[in-house]
């Protein structure tokens, strides 16, 4: 980032705006600051008297800067020009991409603009290749769940369902899993909306609902039609960015039945809900039982800042009042961040995934064939001793990786299915 490195003396965007009014310099400074703060998203929000620059750091939005309203349109136009958008079009939403070279790698930025009451709002999504292509061992799995997931990834065929809300790290998990399979002997094809990050060993396709298929103008380039064409491309492994409709769900099952390994995502709260979601999409239960080999649910959890981390004592009684269910000593020692410059006084620094992995064996498949309710599915998980999101989040808390507040924020579970957790057993098991 040679252009940005020359801006090291600049303290804020407001300072630039009031000195040389150099919009190019101001935009470059914003991206420089975004990268230095490890932000995943940048929001440029026009208000009545100024435009606020907000950045999502470790999953949380923070106000970090502002520019005068008089400069907002020029600032936005510079970003639109960089992302090859139509600068003159201000009334309709637009999407684009920016590529910035750093010393280590190329950073891709997805840009979206929408018209608002005070002008165009811009959001820039930062795609960090180092985060998208991590090793599975570095994602936050405990050893037990990692072994299960690795066994699922190495299955010759079947469907692996990855669930979680937007921004929970599903794409990173999928890319990291498929990277293991990316050898010269395999044809790996992905269908995404859009392609998050280009990887040379994947054949990556972006869906485009605005484009019609050649031989059927009424059919658009969405997941279902594109999956049908991918099946004619001699694939070994297929990744479907998301199953959104009955057609895509049915085709994913057919792909698995014909000997392909299929990775895909669903928006559900936990791993087991993926079964009910597929049933809702009219996939017959007997086909679901014979094709789904495993489910994985995940969230991203903020980690205690290592620069200001400190021990503190908390009573089991207080924790249980807040929603936990512990048995053991009266008090335990946990960790939290006091707040410092490195973590922007939040007490948290970076994030780590927390997972719930369920492998489908013969017993589980038989249960799925009977179209069970959620109670029966959860009883099976308990019987098979799979770890839940809630349990794995608690283990991270007890090992000082995160805090009780973060566990309650990202991994709340149905209290009717929580069993009391004995602290010594929990800590020992996680180790």
Image (tube, rainbow, N blue to C red):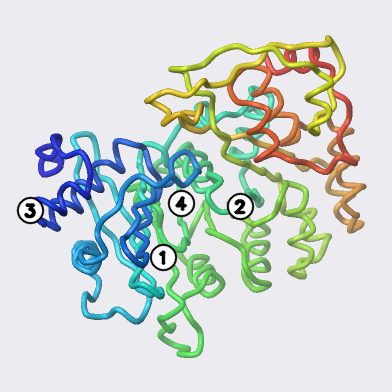
Closer to the N terminus: mark 2 or mark 1?
A: 2
The residue beneath circle 4 is 188
Say which of marks 2 and 4 sits in front: 2
Which mark is drawn over residue 274?
A: none
Closer to the N terminus: mark 2 or mark 4?
A: 2
Q: Residue at x 60, y 33 (%)?
A: 150
The reply to whether discs 4 and 1 touch (Cβ–Cβ < 8 Å) is no
Which mark is drawn over residue 206?
A: 1
Closer to the N terminus: mark 4 or mark 1?
A: 4
C-alpha gap between disc 4 and disc 1: 14 Å
Tag 2's secondary structure? loop
Q: Quadrant of the C terminus?
A: top right
The quarter of the picture where residue 420 lies is: top right
Q: Residue at x 22, y 50 (%)?
A: 14
Say which of marks 1 and 3 sits in front: 3
Tag 3's secondary structure? loop
Q: Choose between 182 and 5: the one closer to the eye.
A: 5
The residue beneath circle 2 is 165
Closer to the N terminus: mark 1 or mark 3?
A: 3
The residue beneath circle 3 is 20
């Amino acid at each position: 980032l040679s252009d940005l490195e020359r801006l090291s003396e600049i303290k804020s965007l407001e300072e630039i705006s009031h000195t040389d009014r150099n919009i190019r310099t101001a935009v470059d400074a914003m991206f420089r600051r975004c990268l230095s703060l490890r932000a995943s998203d940048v929001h440029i929000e026009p208000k009545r008297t100024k435009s606020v620059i907000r950045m999502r750091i470790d999953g949380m939005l923070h106000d970090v800067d502002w520019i005068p309203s008089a400069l907002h349109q020029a600032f936005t136009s510079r970003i639109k020009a960089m992302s090859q958008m139509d600068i003159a079009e201000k009334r309709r939403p637009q999407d684009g991409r920016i590529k910035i070279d750093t010393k280590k790698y190329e950073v891709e930025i997805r840009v979206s603009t929408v018209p608002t009451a005070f002008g165009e709002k811009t959001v820039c999504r930062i795609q960090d290749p180092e985060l998208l292509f991590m090793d599975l061992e570095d994602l936050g799995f405990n050893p037990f769940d990692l072994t299960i997931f690795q066994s699922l990834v190495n299955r010759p065929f079947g469907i692996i369902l990855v669930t979680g809300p937007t921004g929970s790290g599903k794409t990173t998990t999928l890319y990291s899993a498929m990277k293991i399979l990316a050898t010269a002997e395999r044809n790996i094809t992905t269908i995404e909306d859009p392609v998050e990050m280009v990887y040379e060993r994947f054949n990556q396709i972006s869906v485009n609902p605005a484009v019609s298929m050649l031989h059927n103008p009424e059919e658009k380039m969405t997941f279902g039609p594109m999956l049908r064409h991918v099946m004619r491309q001699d694939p070994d492994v297929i990744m479907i960015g998301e199953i959104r409709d009955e057609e895509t769900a049915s085709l994913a099952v057919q792909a698995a039945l014909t000997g392909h390994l299929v990775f895909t995502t669903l928006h559900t709260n936990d791993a087991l809900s993926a079964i009910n979601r597929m049933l809702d999409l009219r996939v017959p239960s007997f086909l679901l039982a014979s094709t789904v080999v495993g489910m994985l649910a995940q969230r991203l959890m903020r980690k205690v800042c290592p620069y200001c981390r400190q021990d503190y004592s908390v009573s089991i009684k207080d924790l249980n009042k807040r929603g936990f269910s512990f048995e053991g000593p009266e008090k335990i020692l946990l960790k939290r961040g006091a707040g410092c410059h490195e973590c922007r006084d939040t007490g948290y620094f970076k994030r780590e995934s927390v997972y719930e992995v369920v492998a489908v064996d013969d017993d589980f498949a038989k249960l799925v064939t009977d179209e069970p309710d959620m109670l029966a599915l959860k009883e099976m998980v308990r019987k098979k001793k799979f770890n839940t999101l809630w349990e794995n989040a608690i283990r991270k808390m007890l090992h000082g990786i995160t805090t009780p507040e973060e566990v309650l924020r990202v991994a709340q579970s149905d209290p009717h299915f929580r069993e009391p957790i004995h602290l010594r057993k929990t800590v020992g098991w996680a180790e």
